[in-house]
Image (cartoon, rainbow, N blue to C red):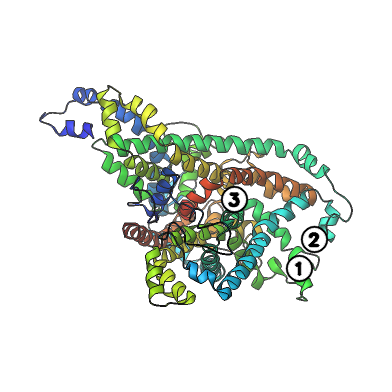
């Protein structure tokens, strides 16, 4: 998956292909993780000889000089861009418009542009009266906890399997890897019963955030991703630190973690987004409406809330993930190669 | 590394004391989060799933019933409907969601300016929370002539479509939304794969006088074979476990036209009327999992060989 031009640096693309993409791309900012970086001169009209000939697509500069090819590519790129704006941005723009449109207008003329003025109070009604503020806070708390739990388990687990490597590491690794092959559907009911009556704890975890935080940590994907990344770090640094008298905790905290910022970023972004998206699990274990996150509350609000206010609530819940995406775009798109695998 | 070397050295007897001296205790501290979290919330439930599928339980008393749960599930007339609907969903999702991202990615990889804009726009729907997307699209699917999609269809003279209200239209509507929500991720996967096609192959094809079409067809496509198969399997695994769309859009209706396997599992365990039949729910989820596990193994083997070449 890593491109032919990527620097020799990380050799992580080894086993887990998808993991390799993320680790490799994240490890070397120079690696062309998303697209070729700046191909040729900026002016498209007359592309001269490009400095990096190995790094090219199906169309050669000669192809680009042919008017037919150039025109048809321009045309298809234009059509593609228009479609992407329509499909990618369109629904979100509509949502933003609905959020500040009076309900009657949304129902009668959904595509007209504010025929009877703007209803800014939809937003405040959603935030205050429908208590979106509370559910928003719940969502943030849930995401923060799920993030902490995933990072803790993934970093310590990866460190154990990659650096410390005790005798039982092989068994642990096999057991972690095996869970990758078990689809989430199998866990649904038995995990629910574990939450209902956890062993050793003596009290039910129902209606407690721990019921969402702790299972989130059991992500084999994160652990293996982290382990692959740690595997790619230079061993000499660890040895040098050990010679200098650093114990396992010091090594973990002062050497391994600071060297792993790129992969921590990828795991963090995906942890937060996954938690923000999660619906079925919080629906099952958080029965008390006061502690439910937005994703669980919104469908039940739907029946009782004015459409305009509901749309405002939907828009508010979309804001944070979209903002996160716009800010950390590179991280998202580099890590997206493993997006599919995260779902499974 | 040093630790394993030390452990293997001369010392014939490993006592708890030497184990602690060699840092076994601090190693265990690092192992603890993983062991506790995976043990309680992954390994234990997986084990219990197998046991529970052979039991009948109402949370107070538990009885072994052998394969009765599997028989109950297989005898349920809804099962055939659910399996059929899930397959129909998967087939439609492939039809809508497989060629479009590929075409888009191949075109996008030739974009020379503002490439980031293209990928950002394509990926935007993926970051919208699925619940929000479904509730928004539910409104788009308004069956009245004033509905969002029906208004748009009206512009080109097409009649109002019943969307979610009609048994034949409901599933394609669900797939339409699901495809919108997922296509961006697939496009990005393809784009990453396209950048890894070695440029020399195109150079060679040009020396042989290949046209643009032939280059795309005979160089790009064969190079993408591995990735195409992987996204195919991922999509099957994902669509087989579809829950959110049928649950929130239609709750399995109209006339059970959108009830899927996972929705059936949910109803066995947590539904209002059936509910509480944990044995049947785990039995059905295990059967689904067995099918998916085979696909996962294929997927894993493929990604492995694919990344090594």
Q: Subunit of mark 2? A: A
Q: Quadrant of residue B92?
A: bottom right
State whether residue B224 is above or below residue A191. below
Give the x, y percent position of residue A71: 61, 72
Could you give the CA–CA distance between mark 2 and mark 1, rounded to whole angstroms? 9 Å
Query: Neighbour class for label 2 at 10 Å: few (<14), some, many (≥20)?
Result: some
Q: Are marks 2 and 1 in contact (CB under 8 Å)?
A: yes
Q: Looking at the rendering, which quadrant does residue B70 occupy?
A: bottom left
Q: Looking at the image, which is closer to me, A60 or A324?
A: A60
Dot 3 falls on a residue whose secondary structure is helix
Q: Quadrant of the N terminus of chain A?
A: bottom left
| Residue B309 seen anywhere in this rendered image of the structure | yes
| Disc 3 to disc 2, C-alpha distance | 24 Å
Task: Tell me the residue that label 3 is attached to.
Answer: B127
- In three-dimensional space, the C-alpha distance between marks 1 and 3, rounded to whole angstroms, equals 25 Å
User: Chain under label 3?
Assistant: B
Q: Residue at x 59, y 56 (%)?
A: B114
Going from N to C along the chain, the mark reached first, 1 or 3, is 3
Badge 3 density bin: few <14, some 14–19, many ≥20, Cα 10 Å: many
Query: Where B281 falls versus B75 (above or below)?
Result: above
User: Looking at the rendering, which quadrant does residue B89 occupy?
Assistant: bottom right
The residue carrying mark 2 is A111
Q: Which residue is mark 1?
A: B152
């Amino acid at each position: 998956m890593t491109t032919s031009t990527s620097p020799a640096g990380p050799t992580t693309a080894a086993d887990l292909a998808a993991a390799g993409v993320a680790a490799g791309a994240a490890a070397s900012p120079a690696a062309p993780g998303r697209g070729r970086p700046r191909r040729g001169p900026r002016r498209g009209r007359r592309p001269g000889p490009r400095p990096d000939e190995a790094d090219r697509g199906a169309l050669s500069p000669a192809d680009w000089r042919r008017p037919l090819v150039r025109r048809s590519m321009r045309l298809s790129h234009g059509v593609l861009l228009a479609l992407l704006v329509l499909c990618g941005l369109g629904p979100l723009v509509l949502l933003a418009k609905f959020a500040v449109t009076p309900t009657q207008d949304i129902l009668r003329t959904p595509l007209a542009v504010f025929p009877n003025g703007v209803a800014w109070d939809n937003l405040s009604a959603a935030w205050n009266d429908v208590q979106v503020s509370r559910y928003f806070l719940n969502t943030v708390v849930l995401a923060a906890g799920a993030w902490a739990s995933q990072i803790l388990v993934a970093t310590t687990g990866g460190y154990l399997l990659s650096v410390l490597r005790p005798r039982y590491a092989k068994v642990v690794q096999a057991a972690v890897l095996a869970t990758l092959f078990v689809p989430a559907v199998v866990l649904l009911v038995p995990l629910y019963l574990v939450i209902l009556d956890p062993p050793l704890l003596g009290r039910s975890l129902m209606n407690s955030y721990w019921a969402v935080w702790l299972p989130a940590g059991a992500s084999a994907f994160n652990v293996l991703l982290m382990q692959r990344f740690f595997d790619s770090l230079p061993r000499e640094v660890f040895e040098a630190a050990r010679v200098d008298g650093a114990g396992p905790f010091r090594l973990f905290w002062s050497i391994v973690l600071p060297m792993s910022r790129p992969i921590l970023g990828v795991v963090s972004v995906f942890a937060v987004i996954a938690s923000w998206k999660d619906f079925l699990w919080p629906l099952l274990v958080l029965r008390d409406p006061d502690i439910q996150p937005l994703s669980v509350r919104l469908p039940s609000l739907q029946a009782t809330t004015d459409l305009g206010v509901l749309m405002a609530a939907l828009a508010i819940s979309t804001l944070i993930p979209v903002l996160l995406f716009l800010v950390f775009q590179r991280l998202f798109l580099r890590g997206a190669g493993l997006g599919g695998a995260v779902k499974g | 590394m040093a630790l394993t070397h030390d452990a293997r050295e001369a010392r014939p007897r490993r006592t708890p004391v030497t184990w602690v001296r060699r840092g076994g205790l601090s190693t265990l501290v690092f192992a603890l989060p993983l062991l506790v979290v995976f043990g309680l919330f992954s390994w234990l439930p997986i084990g219990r799933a197998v046991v529970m599928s052979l039991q009948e339980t109402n949370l107070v008393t538990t009885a072994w019933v052998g394969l009765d749960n599997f028989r109950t599930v297989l005898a349920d007339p809804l099962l055939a409907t659910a399996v059929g609907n899930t397959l129909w969903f998967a087939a439609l999702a492939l039809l809508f969601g497989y060629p479009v991202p590929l075409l888009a990615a191949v075109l996008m990889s030739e974009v020379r300016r503002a490439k980031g804009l293209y990928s950002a726009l394509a990926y935007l729907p993926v970051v919208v929370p699925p619940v929000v997307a479904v509730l928004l699209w539910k409104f788009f699917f308004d069956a009245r002539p004033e509905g969002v999609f029906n208004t748009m269809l009206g512009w080109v003279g097409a009649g109002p479509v019943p969307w979610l209200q009609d048994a034949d239209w409901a599933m394609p509507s669900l797939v339409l939304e699901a495809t919108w929500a997922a296509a961006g991720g697939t496009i990005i996967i393809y784009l990453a794969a396209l950048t890894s096609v070695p440029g020399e192959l195109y150079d060679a094809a040009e020396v042989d006088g290949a046209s643009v079409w032939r280059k795309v067809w005979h160089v790009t496509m064969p190079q993408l074979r591995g990735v195409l198969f992987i996204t195919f399997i991922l999509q099957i695994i994902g669509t087989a476990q579809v829950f959110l769309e049928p649950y929130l859009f239609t709750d399995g209706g109209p006339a059970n036209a959108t009830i899927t396997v996972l929705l059936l599992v949910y109803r066995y365990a947590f539904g209002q009327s059936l509910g509480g039949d944990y044995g049947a729910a785990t039995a059905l989820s295990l059967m689904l999992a067995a099918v998916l596990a085979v696909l996962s193994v294929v997927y894993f083997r493929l990604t492995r060989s694919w990344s090594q070449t």
